[in-house]
């Protein structure tokens, strides 16, 4: 069974976008995942097809209406897939969450616009808020594309060599070590000698040291968690 993604958006023309290219695009064509794009505006009921209204209590911008968004969600029905709402207030997207999603049947992903969505629809339709990071996008669409990109590359059959995923940043709580390729000397800089030594044990030790040092200096938060788990 392939991973089924459904996107609820006010800008369906943004999809599949980058997801039609390269690894994700090939996987889409070969049926390793599927993409169902729903225009939230199709669920509007008034003559003007209104999807938003001004915020209760005042304030700038507009808020997505709960009734219209709920109707769009209900048109999909409950099928066991998690329902996500891309949101800067959400749980941060991590490789752990990406892996959990990739192991499941798919996801229904709601893309917010304007100032966001009415709180009641989040509550009543059990939307899991997921954030791409501590910054504000103009809409959830780029966040949904990033999330799907991360999930799709983990689906069985998508990546040529499954082990290429296992040595990467975050897989064991560490960032990745520096990487090199030919030419051996470039602008006077050499590839570290040890990588050319053919000594697999020494290479593995070097990689681990580099990953630990890099994580400790760049990401004290990840480093503290890693040390708690491994000591
Ligand atoms: N007023 C909101 C921001 C709304 S931005 C606030 O201050 O929190 C409009 C939409 O963009 C959001 O509804 C959400 O779907 C999307 N979005 C913005 N930043 C995001 C982020 N960091 N991660 C995921 N989605 C985001």
Image: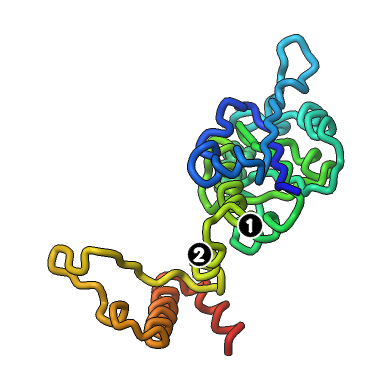
Element type at marker 1? helix
Give the labeled residue for mark 2.
164
Element type at marker 2? helix
Indicate which disc, 1 or 2, sits on the residue closer to the N terminus.
Answer: 1
> In screen coordinates, is 104 left or right of 148?
right
> In screen coordinates, is 184 left or right of 91?
left
Distance from disc 1 to disc 2, alpha carbons, whole Å, reads 16 Å
Give the residue at x 42% y 87%. Answer: 201
Give the residue at x 44% y 74%. Answer: 215
The mark tally for this picture is 2
- Does the CB distance between marks 1 and 2 fall below 8 Å? no
**Ligand 1 quarter of the rendering:** top right
Q: Measured along the vertical axis of the image, is residue 226 above or below residue 145? A: below
Which mark, by number, is residue 98? 1
Residue 68, position as x, y percentages in the image: 78, 26
Q: Which residue reaches farthest bottom?
A: 231
Q: Nearer the viewer, residue 130 or 120?
A: 130
Q: Measured along the vertical axis of the image, is residue 198 above or below residue 117? A: below
């Amino acid at each position: 069974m392939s991973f089924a993604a459904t996107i609820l958006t006010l800008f369906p023309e943004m999809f599949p976008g980058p997801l039609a290219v390269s690894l994700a695009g090939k996987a889409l064509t070969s049926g390793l995942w599927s993409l169902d794009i729903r225009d939230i505006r199709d669920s509007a009921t008034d003559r003007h097809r209104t999807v938003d209204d001004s915020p209760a209590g005042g304030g700038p911008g507009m808020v997505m209406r709960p009734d219209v968004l709920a109707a769009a969600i209900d048109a999909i029905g409950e099928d066991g897939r998690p329902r996500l709402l891309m949101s800067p207030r959400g749980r941060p997207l991590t490789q752990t969450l990406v892996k959990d999603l990739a192991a499941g049947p798919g996801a229904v992903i709601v893309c917010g616009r304007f100032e966001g969505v009415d709180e009641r629809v989040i509550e009543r339709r059990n939307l899991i808020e997921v954030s791409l990071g501590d910054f504000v996008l103009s809409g959830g669409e780029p966040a949904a594309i990033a999330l799907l990109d991360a999930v799709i590359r983990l689906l069985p059959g998508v990546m040529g060599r499954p082990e290429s995923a296992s040595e990467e940043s975050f897989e064991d709580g560490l960032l990745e070590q520096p990487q090199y390729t030919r030419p051996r000397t470039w602008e006077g800089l050499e590839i570290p000698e040890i990588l050319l030594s053919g000594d697999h044990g020494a290479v593995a030790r070097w990689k681990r040291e580099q990953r630990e040092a890099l994580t400790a200096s760049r990401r004290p938060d990840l480093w503290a968690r890693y040390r708690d788990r491994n000591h």
